[in-house]
């Protein structure tokens, strides 16, 4: 019936955000226009970055109201990803911590969107 095409994040600077996601996800985003980039995130899931100043219709929503939730397969992968992002200077809202659903950390993108990584 329906298929989700992508998750759209409103960003202040599409080039800055594109570079951030390319670095942490080790991928090559596509610029679809000067104000719109596509990050092929995982099978059947794309993240699109849209320049907030060029939205049609206009929106007064700013970054930080979204959380991407990423599950990794095991604690070793979880620890490696945290250390890799930390070495790249990624900002964290929460360092690794044990929660009711497992280990989790929360990174922050340039616009304040949260990226939660967890493993059970």
Image (cartoon, rainbow, N blue to C red):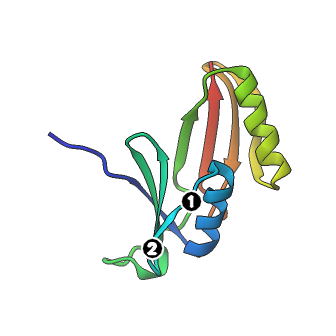
**Residue that appears at 61% across and 46% down:** 115
- How many marks on residues? 2
Label 1 – label 2 distance at C-alpha: 29 Å
Q: Left or right of 83: which side holds 104?
A: left
Q: Which of 113/36 is in front?
A: 36
Q: Quadrant of the N terminus?
A: top left
Q: Is residue 31 above or below residue 77?
A: below
Q: Quadrant of the C terminus?
A: top right
Rendered location of residue 73, percent (x, y): 61, 23
Q: Crowding near pointer 2: few (<14 within 10 Å), some, many (20+)?
A: few
Rendered location of residue 70, percent (x, y): 56, 36
Q: Is residue 56 above or below residue 73?
A: below
Rendered location of residue 118, percent (x, y): 63, 29
Q: Which of 52/33 is in front?
A: 33
Residue 101 picture quarter: top right
Rendered location of residue 98, percent (x, y): 73, 22
- Farthest residue toward the left? 1
Local secondary structure at mark 1: loop
What residue sits right under mark 1 in the picture?
Answer: 28
**Residue that appears at 37% across and 52% down:** 6
Contact, mark 1 vs mark 2 (Cβ under 8 Å): no
- Farthest residue toward the front? 28
Q: Which of 10/47 is in front?
A: 47
Local secondary structure at mark 2: loop
What residue sits right under mark 2 in the picture?
Answer: 60
Q: Crowding near pointer 1: few (<14 within 10 Å), some, many (20+)?
A: some
Decide which of tag 1 and tag 2 comes sooner along the chain. Answer: 1
**Residue that appears at 55% across and 73% down:** 14
Say which of marks 1 and 2 sits in front. Answer: 1
Residue 89 picture quarter: bottom right
């Amino acid at each position: 019936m329906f298929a989700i095409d992508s998750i759209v994040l409103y960003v202040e600077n599409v080039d800055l955000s594109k570079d951030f996601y390319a670095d942490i996800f080790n991928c090559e985003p596509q610029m679809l226009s000067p104000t719109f980039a596509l990050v092929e995130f995982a099978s059947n899931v794309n993240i699109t970055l849209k320049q907030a100043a060029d939205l049609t219709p206009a929106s007064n929503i700013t970054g930080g109201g979204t959380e991407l939730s990423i599950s990794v397969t095991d604690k070793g992968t979880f620890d490696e990803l945290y250390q890799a992002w930390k070495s790249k200077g990624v900002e964290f809202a929460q360092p690794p911590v044990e929660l009711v659903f497992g280990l989790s950390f929360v990174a922050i993108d340039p616009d304040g969107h949260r990226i939660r990584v967890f493993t059970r």
